[in-house]
Amino acid sequence: MAIISQLFAPLPSLPGTLTLTGRSFLPLNPSTQFPKPRLSRERAATLVLQSKGDDSVDASDRIISAVCYFYPFFDGIQYGKFIITQYQPFQILIQPLFPAIRAFKSFPFNGFLIFITLYFVVVRNPNFSRYVRFNTMQAIVLDVLLIFPDLLERSFNPRDGFGLDVVMSLDSTVFLFLLVSLIYGFSACLFGLIPRLPLVAEAADRQVL
C-alpha cells in the first residue's frame, strides 16, 4: 500500500515550473519549434492537385489522361465475351467502341506496342505533367494485372460443368472491373480529378517520380 500511495502522491514542484492545483507543468517556450510531419513527394503532389480543383489541370492533360484508360479495357475486352452475349444492355453500351476495338485487335502486337509507347514516351517523359504520367501509369498497371487471369484461364480451361461456371464468373468479374475502371477513370479525368483505382494506384505512385 505504501508503494501505491507513493505512485499517486503529487510530485514536488521543480524550480522554474508553473504549479496549478498541486500539479506541476513545464514552462512553455513560445519560441519552441516542433518538427512538421513530412509527406512523400508523390503524395504531396497528389494532394496539391486535389486541393487546387479543376482549374489546376489543363484541358489537354485531361483528354490525354482520360483516353489512356481505354487501353486496358480494349486489351481485356475478351473477358466480357460471356456477359456481353447474355445481356443486351452491355452490347448497347459497348457497340460504339466496336470499330476502335477491332482496330486494336487487328494486329497481335498492338497491345505491346502501345504499352512501350505509353511507358517510355509518356510516363518517363518529364515534359508531361505528373497528372498525365500518373493516370497513364495507372492504366498500364491495370493492363499488366490482366496477365494473372490470362494465365489462370490458359492453365484451367474447362469445357463444361462447374469448371466452366467458375471461368465464366472470373471472366465476367474481370470485365466488370475493367468497365468500371474505364468509366471512373475517364469521367474523373474529364473533370480534372485524380482517380485512384484499387490495386493499382499505389503502384502507379511509386513509378511516377
Image (cartoon, grey):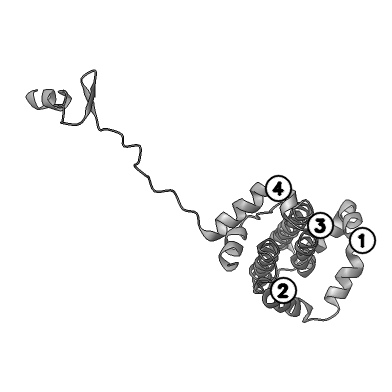
Of callouts 2 and 3, which one flags the residue occurring earlier in the amino acid sequence?
3
Read off the residue under disc 2.
118
* Secondary structure of the residue carrying numbered label 2: helix
User: At label 2, which amino acid type do we have?
Assistant: Leu
Q: Of residues 6 and 49, which is closer to you in this image?
A: 49
Read off the residue under disc 4.
53
The residues bearing labels 4 and 3 have C-alpha atoms spaced at a distance of 37 Å
Q: How many marks?
A: 4
User: At label 4, which amino acid type do we have?
Assistant: Gly
Tell me if label 2 and label 3 are in contact, CB under 8 Å.
Answer: no
For disc 3, the neighbor class at 10 Å (few under 14, some 14 to 19, many from 20) is: some
* Secondary structure of the residue carrying numbered label 4: loop
Q: Of residues 164 and 191, which is closer to you in this image?
A: 191
The residues bearing labels 1 and 2 have C-alpha atoms spaced at a distance of 24 Å
Which mark lies nearer to you, 2 or 3? 2
Read off the residue under disc 1.
96
Of callouts 1 and 2, which one flags the residue occurring earlier in the amino acid sequence?
1
User: At label 1, which amino acid type do we have?
Assistant: Pro
User: At label 3, which amino acid type do we have?
Assistant: Ile
Q: x%, y% of residue 171?
A: 73, 62
Position of the N terminus by quadrant: top left
Q: x%, y% of residue 203?
A: 58, 63
Tell me if label 4 and label 2 are in contact, CB under 8 Å.
Answer: no
* Secondary structure of the residue carrying numbered label 3: helix
Q: x%, y% of residue 75?
A: 76, 70
Which mark lies nearer to you, 4 or 3? 4
